[in-house]
Image: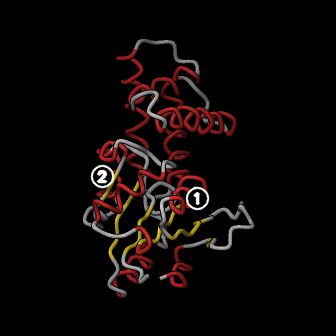
Amino acid sequence: MTLTGVLFDLDGTLGDHDTSVATALTAWLPTVGMVADDATIARWHEVAETHLAAWRRREVDYPEQRRRRLRDLGFAYGNPALDQIFAGYLVEYEKAYHAYDDVTEALAEIAERDLKVAVLTNGSAQQQQGKLARMGLADLGPVWTPDDLGMAKPDPGAFRGAVARWGLRPGEVLSLGDRHDLDVLAARAAGLRAVHLDRPGIGPMDEPHRIRSLRELTDYL
């Protein structure tokens, strides 16, 4: 089946989420009385994954997963105060958020081949649309989130729902993302092609369709 579209993940794929988080925490943590050391930043990532996973399972809503992250870091306040505290972090995160340096080149290559582009991301619609706009990618193509689909990756239904709304067949679409579990295995379970963008080179090493940079995407287009 001829390839018609490329379905991108956002965080860790188009946008440098981890660097943006580190920059934001370095600026924000001292303002709330915490030290921005390696241990605290690592803890932030740990609690974020725990509570984002609960949100992906639809066990909590998006604001609540943020509050739970702060509670795990030791903030003992009510919901309005926690929301305000998290808003301070978001200001720094949004300022720091940026695209990887291989994005423009890859999108140009895709455009030359007359392929469609869309984004399937596990984030809130408003926040993820804002990130794309700050990166100059507001007009990249359709963007689907759990807010739109009612489910999140790694549910294969998220991929099936996105592709159906796109008007394409699963076998015509290539999924590309940095999470092997969310963006590769789940996409294949939904019938899509998939490539793992393994920027840090941590594997899984037995994945046959693994690239380290979007500059290597040409081989799959």
**Which secondary structure, mark 2?**
helix
- Residue 140 position in % (x across, y down): 30, 67
**In the foreground, 110 or 99:** 110
Q: Which residue is labeled 1 in the image?
A: 185
Left/right of residue 100 with respect to residue 50 in the rendered view: left
Q: Which mark is residue 174?
A: none
Q: State which mark lies toward you, 2 or 1.
A: 1
Q: Which residue is labeled 2 in the image?
A: 129
**Which secondary structure, mark 1?**
helix
Which callout, 2 or 1, points at the residue further toward the start of the chain?
2
- Residue 136 position in % (x across, y down): 30, 64
Please determine whether, in this image, residue 48 is positioned above or below residue 21: above
**Residue type marked 2:** Gln
3D distance between C-alphas at marks 2 and 1:
25 Å
Q: Residue furthest right?
A: 205
In the rendered image, which quarter is residue 77 located in? top left
- Tag 2 and tag 1, C-beta contact below 8 Å: no
- Residue 182 position in % (x across, y down): 54, 53
- Residue 66 position in % (x across, y down): 45, 29
Q: Quadrant of the N terminus?
A: bottom left
In the rendered image, which quarter is residue 196 located in? bottom right
**In the foreground, 36 or 72:** 72
Q: Residue at x 38, y 28 (%)?
A: 63
**Residue type marked 1:** Leu
Please determine whether, in this image, residue 130 is positioned above or below residue 72: below
